[in-house]
Image (cartoon, helix red, strand yellow):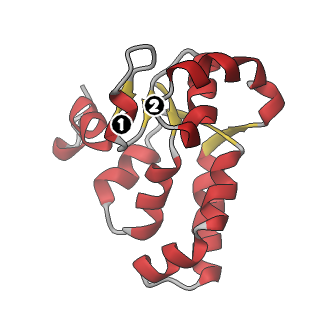
Amino acid sequence: MELVADANVLFSLLIATKQSKTADLFFSDELTLYAPELIVKECIEHRSEICEKSGLDAKDVDILLTLFSAKINILSFYEFDNYIPMAKNICPDPDDVEYFAVALKMKCPLWSNDKRLKLQDKIKVLSTFELISLFDFGSGRSS
């Protein structure tokens, strides 16, 4: 399944490094993940908050960010910029327009725990809980 990963998903993984079901889902071979290059910038901007909440130092956060970023197909702005006008029209949060633009380009759902993003009907938005249920990671098998 192809998904666009929102920054809050990456923040959750960085902050709660022991959430094994979320990590299992993130690193599953069944998922192909995409994100705008903005995702890396957002993680770097929030590094001190991530360190504080996770108990990790900046070096460890950077190592994890590198590991997690390797799983995501990062798209440069020019690869999806022609979808920005449409994304601006449908995205409920101006901060998430680039994620919507990537979802439009890739024609796939968005993985986000931001409930506001579901206040539109053009891009399917799936939460971590919904994806874990969909793939049935709790029982060790996918459906």
Q: In terms of depth relative to the viewer, which is nearer, 142 or 49?
A: 49
x 37%, y 68%: residue: 16
Residue 109 drawn above or below residue 75: above
Number of numbered labels in the structure image: 2
Q: Which amino acid does label 2 sit on?
A: Pro
Percent from the top left, x then y, of residue 85?
68, 19
Percent from the top left, x then y, of residue 63?
63, 71
Disc 1 target residue = 116
Percent from the top left, x then y, of residue 23?
39, 54
Quadrant occupied by the C terminus: top left
Earlier in the chain: of badge 2 and badge 1, it is 2
Q: Which amino acid does label 1 sit on?
A: Arg
Q: In terms of depth relative to the viewer, which is nearer, 83 or 14?
A: 83
Secondary element under disc 2, as helix, strand or loop, is: loop
Horizontal placement of 4 versus 130: left or right? right
Secondary element under disc 1, as helix, strand or loop, is: helix
Q: Residues within 10 Å of mark 1 (few under 14, many from 20)?
A: few
Horizontal placement of 137 versus 90: left or right? left
